Amino acid sequence: MALELELGGRRYWILSEPHGKGWKARVFERRENGESDELGVDATAETRSAADAAAERKLRRLLQLPAE
């Protein structure tokens, strides 16, 4: 399952998967043509929601957008 975000007029997916004893979330930019590019933004945490939230914070910092 992916978390979809729209930030700064662009769409992103945060994809999470089990990683060791926790979770790893990676961020992809989704293009209008259906393709996506991995941005190299990732985060790990003990829970899926914590990994997703950490990846979103990193993405917002990269894009220089305020946290919600």
Image (tube, rainbow, N blue to C red):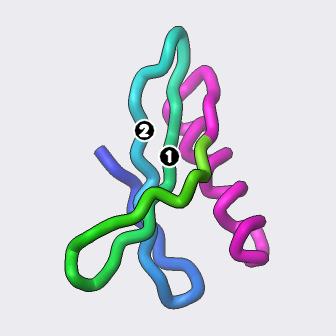
**Circle 1 residue:** 26
Point out residue 60 in the picture as x, y percentages from the top left corner: 70, 67
Q: Residue at x 63, y 39 (%)?
A: 43
Tell me which label, 1 or 2, sits earlier in the chain.
2
Q: Badges 1 and 2: C-beta atoms under 8 Å apart?
A: yes
Amino acid tagged 2:
Ser
Q: Residue at x 62, y 56 (%)?
A: 56
Quadrant placement of the N terminus: top left
Classify residue 5 as left or right of residue 54.
left
The one nearer the camera, 54 or 62, is: 62
At mark 2, the secondary structure is strand
The one nearer the camera, 34 or 50, is: 34
Q: Residue at x 50, y 32 (%)?
A: 48
Q: What kind of secondary structure does the magenta stretch mostly adopt?
A: helix
Find the magenta span and give its range. Answer: 43-68
Q: Is residue 58 magenta?
A: yes
Amino acid tagged 1:
Arg
Q: Is residue 54 magenta?
A: yes
How many discs appear? 2
Point out residue 10 in the picture as x, y percentages from the top left corner: 47, 83
**Circle 2 residue:** 16
- Characterize the local packing of mark 1: few (<14), some (14-19) or many (20 or more) Cα atoms within 10 angstroms: many
- Characterize the local packing of mark 2: few (<14), some (14-19) or many (20 or more) Cα atoms within 10 angstroms: many
The vertical placement of 48 against 15, above or below, is above
Residue that protrudes farthest toward the bottom in the picture: 9
Q: Residue at x 57, y 52 (%)?
A: 40
Q: Nearer the viewer, mark 1 or mark 2?
A: 1
Separation of residues labelled 1 and 2 (CA atoms): 6 Å
Point out residue 39 in the picture as x, y percentages from the top left corner: 53, 60
